[in-house]
């Protein structure tokens, strides 16, 4: 189960690697809990006899639009005898907060907000992305690194703009870290300073 920026719990199938359309596929989207059970959001069957997906199943894989790997069907003749229906989690696997599904919504969402590490990281990635604050040198990989950093953590957007001041007081300065240097650290701080003022439209 992957937890996204909005708290959506997205199920992903882990597959034995298989070549589909010239591409090796080992993951496939499962959409939501209804899709796993074999039904659409209105309760209509989407596979013959409303077949569900279970751990250990042999499944038919295709790439929607020759891009996104999806599961089309399951071979019940090869299903393990001890296979059990998948129980979709009702708590977030990342922070143990309740995962609620509102009436009429196909998606179950974590209610933890920023206390959920997955939501927090994804929100930070969105904050620094090209279409938002567009902070050069602070991409998804760097956000993940800083989120886990004990000396210079970035846990919320405001932490980005105090990074340089905190670095000046820190014993473990960024320029002394693996993969960083004096110039790369200064480039990052300069990019952050530049984004202290942005157009209102981008902020919104």
Image (cartoon, rainbow, N blue to C red):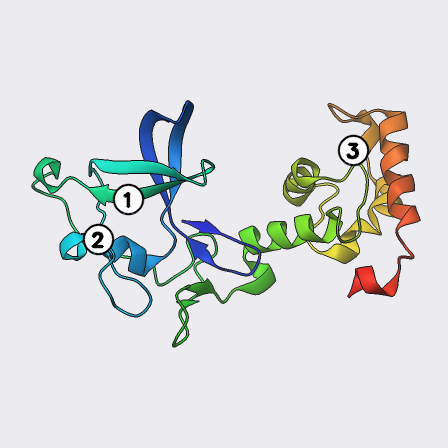
The residue located at (86%, 65%) in the rendering is 200
The residue under label 3 is: 172
Q: Quadrant of residue 116?
A: bottom right
Q: Residue at x 11, y 38 (%)?
A: 80
CA neighbours of label 2 inside 10 A, class few (<14), some (14 to 19), many (20+): some
Q: Secondary structure at mark 1?
A: strand
Circle nearer the N terminus (3, 1): 1
Which label number is shown at residue 47?
2
Query: Marks 3/2: CA distance?
Result: 56 Å
Residues at discs 3 and 2 in contact (Cβ within 8 Å): no
Task: Give the numbered dot on residue 2.
Answer: none
Disc 1 from disc 2: Cα separation: 8 Å
Could you tell me residue 27's position as x and y percent? 39, 36
Q: SS for tag 3?
A: loop
- Quadrant holding the C terminus: bottom right
Number of residues whose C-alpha sits closer than 10 Å to that of mark 3, classed few (under 14), some (14–19) or many (20 or more): few
Contact check, label 1 and label 2, Cβ < 8 Å: yes
Give the x, y percent position of residue 131.
75, 51
Q: Is residue 136 left or right of residue 72?
A: right
Q: Residue at x 67, y 48 (%)?
A: 125
The x and y percentages for residue 64 are 41, 42
Along the viewing direction, whichever of 133 and 159 lies nearer the viewer: 133
User: 99 or 57: nearer the eye?
Assistant: 57
Q: Answer with left or right where residue 7 lies relative to residue 39.
A: right
Badge 1 density bin: few <14, some 14–19, many ≥20, Cα 10 Å: few
Mark 1 sits on what residue?
72
**Disc 2 on helix, strand or loop?**
loop
Q: Is residue 178 left or right of residue 66?
A: right
Looking at the rendered image, the disc whose residue lies closer to the viewer, 3 or 2, is 2
Rendering coords of residue 53 (x, y %): 23, 48
For the point 79% across and 47% down, the residue is 134
């Amino acid at each position: 189960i992957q937890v996204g920026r909005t708290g959506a719990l997205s199920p992903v199938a882990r597959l034995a690697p298989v070549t589909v359309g010239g591409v090796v596929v080992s993951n496939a989207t499962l959409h939501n809990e209804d899709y796993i059970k074999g039904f659409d959001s209105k309760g209509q069957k989407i596979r013959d006899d409303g077949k569900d997906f279970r751990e250990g199943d042999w499944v038919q894989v295709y790439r929607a639009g020759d891009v996104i790997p999806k599961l089309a069907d399951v071979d019940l003749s090869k299903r393990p005898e001890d296979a059990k229906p998948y129980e979709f989690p009702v708590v977030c696997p990342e922070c143990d907060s309740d995962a609620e599904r509102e009436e009429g919504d196909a998606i179950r969402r974590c209610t933890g907000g920023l206390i959920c590490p997955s939501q927090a990281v994804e929100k930070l990635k969105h904050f620094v992305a090209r279409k938002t604050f567009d902070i050069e040198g602070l991409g998804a990989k760097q956000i993940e690194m800083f989120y886990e950093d004990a000396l210079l953590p970035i846990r919320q957007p405001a932490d980005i703009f105090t990074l340089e001041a905190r670095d000046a007081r820190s014993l473990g300065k960024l320029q002394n870290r693996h993969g960083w240097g004096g110039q790369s650290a200064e480039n990052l701080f300069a990019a952050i300073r530049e984004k202290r003022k942005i157009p209102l439209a981008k902020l919104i």
